[in-house]
Image: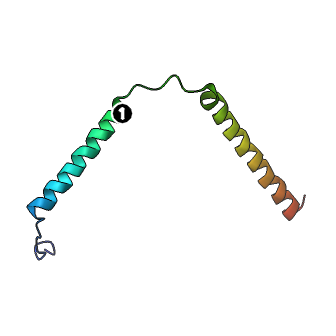
Amino acid sequence: MSLAGLKTFDVDRRRADRLRARCHSSLRSRTAREARPARSDRPRFRRLFAPGLAGAWCVLYLLEIIRRAVVIYGQ
């Protein structure tokens, strides 16, 4: 019932065409990015060591949080 009382406002034709063109170009670029083959020539550092380094950093950070909590709240 409340929807029936709303007015409709149409977008002018030029605005609709510009919006449609932007959407089409965005979809084309996304499709082109997804269609590219995965790069297997990435440096070994990025592929192997970077995730390990990030994981080690997270573990050290978590251990430091636990250590500080023990110091604050007692043993």
Q: Is residue 60 left or right of residue 4?
A: right
Vertical relation: 48 (above or below) 8: above
Which picture quadrant has residue 4?
Answer: bottom left
- Place of residue 14 in the rendered image (x, y in percent of width and height, measured from the top left): 12, 60
Instruction: Give 1 or 42, whichever is nearer the viewer.
Output: 42
Q: Residue at x 64, y 28 (%)?
A: 48
- Place of residue 46 in the rendered image (x, y in percent of width and height, measured from the top left): 61, 32
- Place of residue 19 in the rendered image (x, y in percent of width and height, measured from the top left): 20, 55
As drawn, which residue projects farthest toward the right? 75
- How many marks the image carries: the answer is 1
Q: Is residue 2 left or right of residue 26?
A: left
Report the quarter where the C terminus lies.
Answer: bottom right
Vertical relation: 54 (above or below) 5: above
Residue at image mark 1: 34
Q: Residue at x 25, y 44 (%)?
A: 25
Q: Residue at x 80, y 52 (%)?
A: 64
Question: Dot 1, crowdedness within 10 Å: few (<14), some or many (≥20)?
Answer: few
Element type where label 1 sits in the image? helix
Which picture quadrant has residue 57?
Answer: top right
Report the quarter where the N terminus lies.
Answer: bottom left
Q: Mark 1 is on which residue type?
A: Glu
Vertical relation: 5 (above or below) 48: below
As drawn, which residue projects farthest toward the top? 40
Q: Is residue 17 left or right of residue 54?
A: left
Instruction: Give 46 or 2, whichever is nearer the viewer.
Output: 46
Q: Is residue 58 left or right of residue 73?
A: left
Q: How is the image coloured?
A: rainbow
Instruction: Give 48 or 14, whichever is nearer the viewer.
Output: 14
